[in-house]
Image (cartoon, helix red, strand yellow):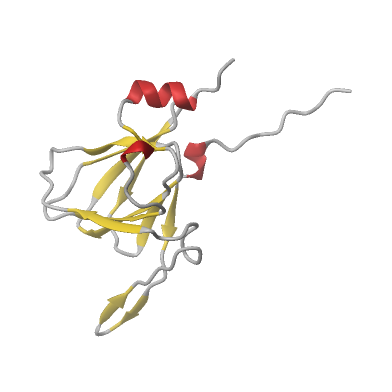
Amino acid sequence: MRRLAEKVESRIDRCRLMELPRVASRQGSITSVEGNVEIPFPIRRVYYLFDIPGEAARGGHAHKKLEQLLVAVMGSFDILVDDGKRQKRFHLDRAYKGLYIPTMVWRTLDNFSSGGICLVLASELYDEGDYYRDYRRFLQASTPAR
C-alpha cells in the first residue's frame, strides 16, 4: 500500500505578517502585545535597532531556538527571510504590524528609511551559541542528512 506524502510546511512559510491589536482615538493610537496571546511565544527579551544608515544591512543570521517578532515602530525597512531553499521579502512600515520569524530562518534587514527603528520581541535571552552567523553553516544545519 502506497503512502501519500504529507505536505510539510517549510519554515519560510511560517514567516508571516501579523496585524497587532490597535486602539485608535483622536488622542492617538496604542498597540499592546502579550507573549502567547497575540504572538506565538513568550517574550523573554526586547531590543531595538536605530540610527541605521539607509544603505546598511543588519541581521544576517539565523537562530537555533529563538523565535522573534519584528516591528517598524518608526519609519520603514525590508526583511529578507531565507530557509536555505527559498527566499521571501517583507516590508514593514506600520507600528501595529509585525513579522513573525520562527527558528532556523536566516534574516537580513535592509532599506531602512531615515529615522527607522526596528523593535524586536524575542522568545529567548541572548545566547551567542544560539546563532548561525555563517550562512554556509546555516545551510548545512538546515539541510537534512541523506
Residue lying furthest bottom: 26
Nearest the eye: 10 or 122: 122
Direction from residue 16 to residue 55 in the image, left or right:
left
Q: Where is residue 64 drawn, in percent x and y?
A: 43, 38
Residue lying furthest top: 146
77, above or below 23, in the image: above
54, above or below 39, in the image: above
Direction from residue 86 to residue 93 in the image, left or right:
left
- Count all numbered tags in the image, as a single digit: 0
Q: In the rendered image, which quarter contains the C terminus?
A: top right
Q: Where is residue 77 drawn, in percent x and y?
A: 24, 48
Q: Quadrant of residue 10?
A: top right
Is residue 118 visible in the rendered structure shown here?
no
Q: Quadrant of residue 105?
A: top left
Is residue 21 visible in the rendered structure shown here?
yes
5, above or below 88, in the image: above
Q: Which residue is painted at 81% across and 26% down in the image?
A: 3
Q: Where is residue 27 drawn, in percent x and y?
A: 24, 84
Direction from residue 4 to residue 10 in the image, left or right:
left
Q: Which residue is painted at 89% across and 23% down in the image?
A: 1
Q: Which residue is painted at 43% across and 57% down in the image?
A: 18
Nearest the eye: 27 or 70: 70
Residue lying furthest right: 1
Q: Where is residue 59 drawn, in percent x and y?
A: 26, 39
Q: Which residue is painted at 26% across and 84% down in the image?
A: 26
